Image: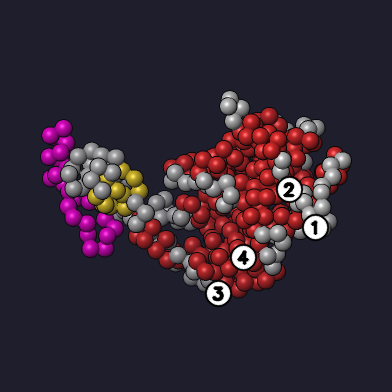
Amino acid sequence: GVAARNRMSSIAETVSSDGEHCFVKTCSFRSRKCVLCLNHQQKTFLCKRHRYKGCCRCHEPGTYQQDAAFRSQSPAAGHQPDRGLLIQLKGMVSQGKHDAACDLIDHHLSVLKDSSPSARLLKAQLYLEKGNVFHSMAGVPGAQEEKSQSLQKACDAFRTSVEVFETFAWGERDEQGYADALLSEANLEARLARLLGHQNLTQAKKKARTAQKILNRLECSTKATAIRVLGVIWLTLGDLPKAKQLFLAAIRAFRTSGKELESIWSAVAHWNVHLVLKDLGKNSDSVPWLKRATMIREHIEGPDAPYVKMYRESLDGLLKQLGYEKTKNQKSEAMSRGEWEAIDLALNPGH
């Protein structure tokens, strides 16, 4: 009301020259949270304690969202690592150049001697990419022991990435990167548990749910990935119906966000449904999901990526087992109308 408006008016001030202080004069906190008043499109810096009390322009209570410009004020995000380097590493992984990618990452890690925010952010990102390299190596054909070792190295790299992200204070951390690292670690903890016969996934659940909360708060399209990882955990615990429900929910979320054909985790979610149906003894029903997983992953990574080859080999083997024959020049993953309808019916059972 009027009293609240006058109170906020009396304590509001313009932003300080360094752009870091809370607008409220009586507040001693420093803040780099740039928020946007949705009523007046007014940007302001407000600390966690005061950010919902009123717009610095009209001094009325309003609805706020974090403004994208905040990232340029964050000490970590203000010193983003070379995006070209990260893109280069992702390209090397998709091409199967694992050793070269590891060497490049190790080289950059070796020269990071200081503990500045920019150095710590780069370190966290590099360990995240290193985990992705080892994860990709696990998809290369080879002995099961070698795959397990690669998965363990990937999990260790993801864990280090999480630890480095956690050295940043709340509000200064790259939340998107932190959530990605948490999900990657939780995902591999579940995979390793399935391979090694472990059942204690309490920490994996906690990490996945923490990441899910972060992504929901950011209204990030990758929140579907968190749902998928929770499905992997329930699959490892042997609850196949629950796991299938989560995988289908993840695919629906990818579709809703428009990222179904852009995220490899969308492909993996289809692969996961295939695995559940196979475990339930429904090999024929699993075929459309494996075909769709192969199509999406190849669309994103190209035909020569390690996991694309693994998917296609699995598909060829399954089709041969079921006695299916493909016509000349027909790709194994080519889908019939009935297979498309089977997927749509599973994702939209009430329609």
How far across and down, in percent of the image, does residue 163 sit?
55, 55
Label 4: element kind = helix
Which amino acid type corresponds to the residue marked 1 in the rendered image?
Pro
Q: Residue at x 41, y 50 (%)?
A: 170
Alpha carbon separation for disc pair 3 and 2: 45 Å
Q: Report the magenta stretch's main SS.
A: loop
The CA distance from mark 2 to mark 1 is 20 Å
Question: From this viewpoint, is residue 148 visible?
Answer: no
The answer to whether marks 1 and 4 mark residues whose Cβ atoms lie closer than 8 Å is no
The numbered dot on residue 91 is 4
In this rendering, the label closer to the viewer, 1 or 3: 1
Nearest to the eye among marks 2 and 4: give it: 2
Residue 141 numbered tag: 1
Across and down, in percent, residue 93 comes to 65, 63
Q: Nearer the viewer, residue 298 or 2?
A: 298
Mark 4 closeness class: few <14, some 14–19, many ≥20 residues within 10 Å: some
* Image quarter in which the C terminus is found: top right
Q: Mark 4 belongs to which amino acid?
A: Gly
Q: Which residue is mark 3?
A: 111
Give the camera-side residue of 219 and 316: 316
